[in-house]
Amino acid sequence: DHLINQIAAGEVVERPASALKEIVENSLDAGATDVHIQLQEGGITLIKVSDNGCGIQKEQLSLALARHATSKIRSLNDLEQVGSLGFRGEGLASIAAVSRLTLTSRETGSDYAWQVETQEGEISAPAPAALQKGTVIEVRDVYYNTPARRKFLKTATTEFGHCDDTCKRLALAWPTVSFTFSHNGKVCWKFPIQSRQARIAAVLGESFMEEGLPVDAANGQLSLYGMIGSPTQSRSSRDAQYFFVNGRFVKDKLVSHALREAYRDVLHHERHPVYALFFTLPPDLVDVNVHPQKSEVKFRDSGAVYRLLKGAIQQVLAGTVAGAQTPSIDT
Ligand code: ADP
Ligand code: MG
């Protein structure tokens, strides 16, 4: 039902950047190695994403836009082991409910590409289209049909900033994929396929890389890898805090608390550190289905996670302080 879809869309599509996140995550789930993102007016008038992933077969095109249709998990059991970024099957349906959406795709091995469009929640029949490979999604005029939500859209500049953040987070987590990001016809940034180190440098800047402190710690099945800003480095913006759990950007109180405590214990100040940290653990030890936007997670053993984080960061920081005692990682 169109109205129900529009209401539910509010949870997933908070702003253009959240639509963009769902779309790019689909490209990554589809195994794309090259993703092009083109925006107009901060994504308000156009979000266009092209990928070279596996594509969608003709018969599945309208299903891809239907609510709760996902090709990624089959049962609740699979949710325990979810390895894909998407699994709720509501990303595209939600976006389609509040925009004019065009989906063009060519399944790998197929001789033809097909296109469907949505208008007021109605999905058109697949029409032949021209596309070499992969999928192209065009989302126009977000919230054109929901004035109450449209009012909450900020200026194109602000919405652009959110889109830029969102894509940089994804780019950081996926150095094995090349990204091109353009706005109003101009390329803003472009990252080739590169090493994890090189991608961190590309996103966070060479100086962060040169002065930053590498982190590499593990405890049993938990591991932590990445960089934290050196304590002497000039204070950067709070936004330069990237924490990924199994490749997913996460905002977590436990994480920020562990880091803050580590800084306080070793350096005796509470400055907000800059970091790009990648935390991995077996998928069944973390619940990613806490929030529709999947930006929050629940760890099964949050104590162990906290101790590993704090211990690892303390150890790295202690190395920068003459005479400081190196705390051991105790879990
Ligand atoms: P979810 O990602 O949770 O499965 P979505 O609504 O985001 O749900 O997408 C629905 C389905 O459409 C996906 O399960 C996938 O099969 C298909 N799909 C969407 N985007 C792409 C893409 N870029 N490449 C291939 N398949 C896609
Ligand atoms: Mg999805």
Image (tube, rainbow, N blue to C red):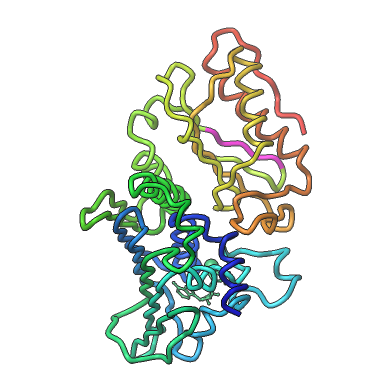
In the displayed structure, 175 sits above or below 301; it is below
Residue 160 at x, y = what percent? 36, 49
In the displayed structure, 242 sits above or below 63; it is above
Which residue shows up at 63% across the image and 30% down it?
A: 312
Q: Quadrant of residue 184?
A: bottom left
- Which one is in front, 104 or 85? 104
Left or right, 300 with reference to 270: right
What's the magenta region?
215-219
Which residue shows up at 69% across the image and 64% down it?
A: 81
Residue placed furthest toward the top: 323
Which residue shows up at 41% across the image and 74% down it?
A: 101
Q: Quadrant of the C terminus?
A: top right
Does residue 217 show up magenta in the picture?
Answer: yes
Residue placed furthest toward the left: 186
Left or right, 307 with reference to 7: right
In the displayed structure, 20 sits above or below 56; it is above
- Which one is in front, 265 or 48? 48
Q: Is the magenta stretch mostly helix, strand or loop?
A: strand
Does residue 315 show up magenta in the picture?
Answer: no
Residue 52 at x, y = what percent? 36, 72
Q: In which quarter of the image is the N terminus?
A: bottom right
Q: Quadrant of residue 8?
A: bottom right
Residue 105 at x, y = what percent? 38, 81
Numbered circles on residues, count: 0
Which residue shows up at 38% across the image and 72% down it?
A: 137
Residue 60 at x, y = what percent? 51, 86
- Which one is in front, 189 or 312? 189
